[in-house]
Image (spheres, grey):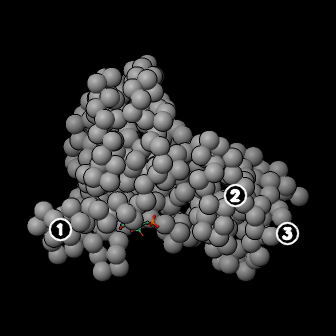
Amino acid sequence: MTRSVTVRVPAKVNVQLAVGGRRPDGFHDLANVFLAVGLYDEVTATPADALTLTCTGPDADQVPLDDSNLAARAARALAARHGLDPHVHLHIAKDIPVAGGMAGGSADAAGALLACDALWGTATPHSELLSLCAELGSDVPFSLVGGAALGRGRGELLEPLPVGGTFHWVFAVADGGLSTPAVYKECDRLRDTAGLGATTADVPDPEPSPALLDALRAGDATALAGALANDLQAAALSLRPALAATLAAGTHAGALAALVSGSGPTTAFLAPDAEAAERIAAALRASGTCRTARATSGPAPGATVLTNG
Ligand code: C5P
């Protein structure tokens, strides 16, 4: 009998986040170029008498352990799909910054889906897992597949992208999180204030940058640095002006480029190589402009079963 299943799931950075206008359903159409990076959460599913949840890690106290937790919602959704009771204990070993713009909650949802599917022997087809992911959140399908992908629609319609090499990154973790809906709302407010309008009628359709896709395909960090773009950056900086000092500190330390990761407040720095990434991380930690800084690389694989038994 299977006693527990552990799944490892990566964080992501958006190397391009082009945000279209607000749709009637409140979401925004995106051209969202995801890159999975080597910071991971691990989700372990164990049989239990009820759905229960625990979490460990430096930010564990910020993770909700009630029904709102995306991992718990994922287990419920999979159980409902197969007519089962969601009787499972989920343990999240959390290393991805919480509410940081790196899809940590989405990673836990994708991890819980894959872990429960293996634990329960439900063998859900990949396409069905992907649609369950999309129902749980816009970034959850990408957490399942990893690598690099273009996300259209609200980010859930994925097209895998070729990547021709390893990119080295540093992530500066801020104190406290930012709410993703609040950042999108601020993006709309800034567009309205600028007189541009914020609906799909006002904002051009978001498109991926050909230069950015070429840079990914070629594995060319210098070219990628010139093409990185995040339409939510101005909104994240408006809500958290102190992030400007973090971006400046990483650039000063030798990053090829700096940007806010997704809706923030984690900031991302592209480094020329692994050694430079370690140096930039050390400089950021010493700068006093962030809580900590982590060097890693991408692309990283998607949700992966580590132990099953
Ligand atoms: O899909 P998810 O639950 O992760 O989205 C969280 C929130 O982020 C949404 O409720 C919405 O406010 C905002 N969002 C958006 N457009 C997207 C994705 C997310 O406005 N494409």
Q: How many marks?
A: 3
Residue nearest the viewer, comparing 309 with 138: 138
Residue nearest the viewer, comparing 163 with 253: 253
Q: CA distance from mark 3 to mark 1?
A: 51 Å
Tag 3 residue: 49
Look at label 3 and name its amino acid.
Asp
Q: Quadrant of residue 280?
A: top left
Q: Write down which quadrant ligand 1 falls in.
A: bottom left
Tell me the SS state at disc 2: helix
Label annotation for residue 156:
none
Q: How far across and down, in percent of the image, does residue 94 sit?
A: 62, 46
Q: Quadrant of residue 124?
A: bottom right
Tell me the SS state at disc 3: loop
Q: How far across and down, in percent of the image, does residue 96 sit?
A: 55, 45
Residue visible at 43% across and 35% down in the picture: 290
Tag 2 residue: 115
Tag 1 residue: 192
Residue visible at 41% across and 29% down in the picture: 288
Look at label 1 and name its amino acid.
Asp
Pointers 3 and 1 in contact (CB under 8 A)? Answer: no
Tell me the SS state at disc 1: helix
Q: Quadrant of the N terminus?
A: bottom right
